[in-house]
Amino acid sequence: MTEADQEAYGAILATAKVIRRAALRVFADEGLTDPQFQVLMLLVEKGPVLMRKLSDELFVTPANITGIVDRLEEKGLVTRTPGTGDRRATIIEISPAGKALFERVAIKKAEMLQKTLRMFTKDELVTLHGLLEKFQREMSQSVGGS
């Protein structure tokens, strides 16, 4: 790996850390963890989902997703209903309060991002987008992902 490669990779990792730290602050301000927000986002995108599907989608163990959903349910942000046909299947659905919280957090994240991106020209944003897509594509191919 060349010095330029290492510097570019270091800048990408540092950027990812800054983005993650900022997002975690927004979540914490609303009493959420990152995994809890990810569950809410998935439920908003896909609608009611089997608990096992949540586990698969978020790449966490069934025990881990159970704990995350337990805490979301305690806060009134999701509901559980038994699945039909399989006694072990549980369907998770976002509650109106969960949807409202998700939307509030999503707006805060978007405002934070807009404030940050305002410093770039339109051409710089197009270039940034293209470079990041290229990096993602190449990284995915190099590790055999899709």
Image (cartoon, helix red, strand yellow):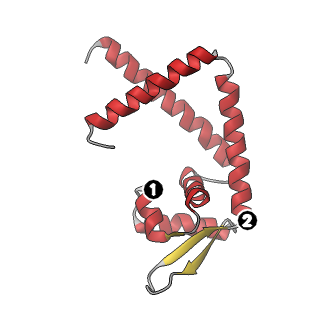
Query: Which amino acid lies under the numbered mark 1 shown in the image of this protein?
Result: Leu
Q: Residue 136 placed where, x, y %?
A: 39, 32
Q: How many marks?
A: 2
**Image quadrant where one finds the C terminus:** top left
The residue closer to the viewer here, 20 or 118, is 118
The residue closer to the viewer here, 56 or 22, is 56
Q: Is residue 71 above or below residue 127?
A: below
In the picture, measured across the screen, residue 126 lies left or right of residue 8, that is right
Residue 72 in which image quadrant: bottom right
Q: Badges 1 and 2: C-beta atoms under 8 Å apart?
A: no
Where does label 2 land, which residue?
96
Q: Residue at x 62, y 58 (%)?
A: 44
Where does label 1 land, which residue?
58
How much space separates mark 1 and mark 2, taking CA atoms? 22 Å
Helix, strand or loop at mark 2? helix
Specify which label sits upstream in the sequence, 1 or 2: 1
Helix, strand or loop at mark 1? helix
Is residue 30 in view from this perspective?
A: no
Is residue 73 in view from this perspective?
A: yes
Q: Residue at x 44, y 63 (%)?
A: 55
In the picture, measured across the screen, residue 90 lies left or right of residue 1, that is right
Query: Which amino acid lies under the numbered mark 2 shown in the image of this protein?
Result: Pro
The residue closer to the viewer here, 136 or 16, is 136
Residue 40 in which image quadrant: bottom right
Q: Residue 39 placed where, x, y %?
A: 55, 58
For disc 2, the neighbor class at 10 Å (few under 14, some 14 to 19, many from 20) is few
